[in-house]
Amino acid sequence: MPDFENVAKTADMPADSLKTIYVKDTPILLANVKGKFLAIGAICTHRGCDLSEGTLQVTTVVCACHGARWNLETGTASFMRPLPDLPVYATRVADDNIQIKIP
């Protein structure tokens, strides 16, 4: 059964920030969107870039390499051509810990 795992402290993720974390060797992009924590796969499916180096536009992350975009709530990609979507991970906050549900 999937379980939640502590991945960061809320104090380490200021509002409108992006950070790549590793859970069981899997890179996951953690985002703080105005106090709401969201998590998707961290690697761009277009060029393999780390999405934490990109920019946050409301609930969309824009890859720094070539401008591909992913919705942080659905993992859906949008770009000039179809790209694979990214996995989405459920998040929650327990005390001051940000937790991700690991499949």
Image: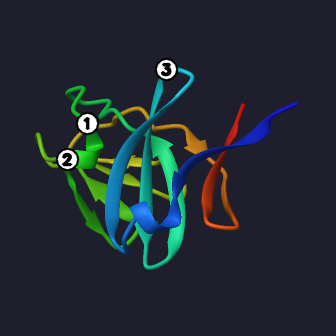
Q: Quadrant of residue 95?
A: bottom right
SS at mark 2 in the image: helix
Asked whether the residues under the numbered discs 2 and 3 touch, taking CB atoms below 8 Å apart as contact, a structural biologist would say: no
SS at mark 1 in the image: loop
Residue 61 place in picture, x, y as percent = 31, 56
Q: At label 3, which amino acid type do we have?
A: Asp
Residue for point 28% across, 43% down: 51
Give me the C-alpha separation between circle 3 and circle 1.
Answer: 14 Å
Residue for point 43% across, 39% down: 21
Residue for point 41% across, 32% down: 84
Q: At label 1, which amino acid type do we have?
A: Asp
Give me the C-alpha separation between circle 2 and circle 3.
Answer: 19 Å
Residue 31 place in picture, x, y as percent = 42, 59
Mark 3 vs mark 1: give the one in front: 3
Q: Quadrant of residue 101?
A: top right
* Residue 50: mark in rendering: 1
Asked whether the residues under the numbered discs 3 and 1 touch, taking CB atoms below 8 Å apart as contact, a structural biologist would say: no
Q: Mark 3 = which residue?
A: 25
How many C-alpha atoms fall within 10 Å of the one at disc 3: few (<14), some, or many (≥20)? few
- Report whether 31 appears left or right of 79: right
The quarter in which the N terminus is drawn is top right
Residue 32 place in picture, x, y as percent = 43, 66
* Residue 68: mark in rendering: none
Looking at the picture, does residue 98 appear above or below residue 81?
below
How many C-alpha atoms fall within 10 Å of the one at disc 1: few (<14), some, or many (≥20)? many
- Between discs 3 and 1, the one toward the N terminus: 3
The quarter in which the C terminus is drawn is top right
Q: Mark 2 = which residue?
A: 53
Give me the C-alpha separation between circle 2 and circle 1.
Answer: 6 Å
